[in-house]
Image (spheres, rainbow, N blue to C red):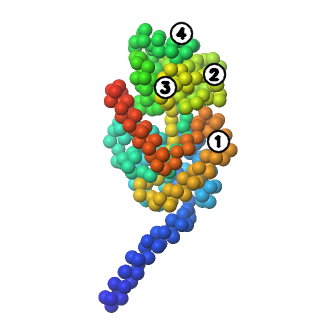
Amino acid sequence: MKLIRRTLIAAVLAALPLAHAVAQDHYPSRPIVLVNPYAVGGPADLLGRALAKDLGDALGQPVVVENKAGGGASIGAAFVAKAAPDGYTLLLGTAAAHTVTPTATKVPYDGIADFEFVGMVANVPNLLTVHPSVPAKSLKELIALAKAQPGKLSYASAGMGSSPHIGGEMFKHAAGVSLMHVPYRGAAPAATDMVAGSVQVGLLNISGVLPFVKTDRLRALAYGGSKRSADLPDVPTFAEAGLPGMETGSWYSLAVPAKTPAAIVDKLAQALQKVQGQPEFKKLLAAQNAEVMPQMKAQATDYIRADGKRLAELVKATGMKLQD
């Protein structure tokens, strides 16, 4: 009897790797969950739902969005980090989830080590704008004005640790100027107060301030993307305006829990590349002034590591606070 039991156990153990391989070969065989670490209705939600639909079409299984907002994106990120590494729980990642919040406070996960990065999805650049009352018609003029009046100009952000906050501190550091930071609870109230003239400068997502620039209620001086925006072809990038290497915006990635099998990560990366090449997805990104980010797997990991290193260096160099 003992011999039979041992034989059965050995047979089961021998079959496990084969069953695991078969599961990977048939992936996906059921619906997939895409966790969005932000609330329903925001820019991330719009992107996440479009991404989920197109990924589902590419993979042949539904991809369902679950919003798990809060904690500076750490609630959703922690949920995915602790999920089974089987490819059925994905994360719409951001700088907040992977670098900012883990740097600012203690979270129950490692923003990089606890994930496998499928690829980068898109980037929404920030746009440096000023209220029309500011006597600066170019980035160089704004820098000269700020240096002549240190600390008198203020800049609005979407909150402590947000990409506009980090972008604003990057600008201050790169240009060698002093601006007073005024954090808001989101980009919308920040833009509203800029239009009202309560705050003179802002480095907010272009999608949130473009209507005000188009109606001359704000003046655009520099664009945070790698190339000029098609909507504002006369506005130079920071590099063109005299600050080489200065790029700022909100990036989105696609990640799964660490130890997810390479074969599954590869299938997801192939599906993501297919989605990024589809005209409708490109049209959606264009409507948000977002740029496709083609980095996949190792390239995505390198990008996020570099972003985290840049943030750490910025915090050290400027003494900036990422939380209230």
Give neighbour class at mark 3: few <14, some 14-19, many 20+ (Cα, 10 Å).
Answer: few
Q: Is residue 224 above or below residue 262?
A: above
Percent coordinates x, y for residue 204 in the rendering: 52, 27
Residue to which mark 1 is pinned:
282
Residue 61 relative to residue 12: left or right: right
User: What residue sits 45% from the left and 39% below the top?
Assistant: 95
Looking at the image, which is closer to me, 321 or 184? 321
Residue type at mark 3 is: Pro
Query: How far separated are the C-alphas under marks 4 and 2?
Result: 19 Å
Kind of residue indicated by mark 4: Pro
Q: Which residue is mark 2?
A: 234
- Mark 3 vs mark 4, foreground winner is 3
Tell me the distance, in whole angstroms, between the alpha carbons under discs 1 and 4. 37 Å
Among numbered discs 3 and 1, the one appearing first in the sequence: 3
Q: Earlier in the sequence, mark 3 or mark 4?
A: 4
* Residue 148 locus on image (x, y percent): 43, 8
Residue matched to label 4:
135
User: Disc 2 or disc 1, which is closer to the eye?
Assistant: 2
Quadrant that contains the C terminus: top left
Gap in angstroms between the C-alphas marked 3 and 1 = 28 Å
Residue at mark 3 to residue at mark 2: CA–CA distance: 18 Å
Q: Are marks 3 and 4 in contact (CB under 8 Å)?
A: no
Q: Is residue 171 among the parts visible in the rendering?
A: yes
Q: Secondary structure at mark 3?
A: loop
Which residue is farthest left?
Answer: 2
Percent across and percent down for residue 8 are 38, 83
Query: SS at mark 1?
Result: helix
Q: Which badge, 2 or 1, is on the more N-terminal residue? A: 2
User: What element does badge 2 sit on?
Assistant: loop
In the picture shown, does residue 189 fall above or below 62? Answer: above
Residue 180 placement (x, y as % from top left)? 41, 18
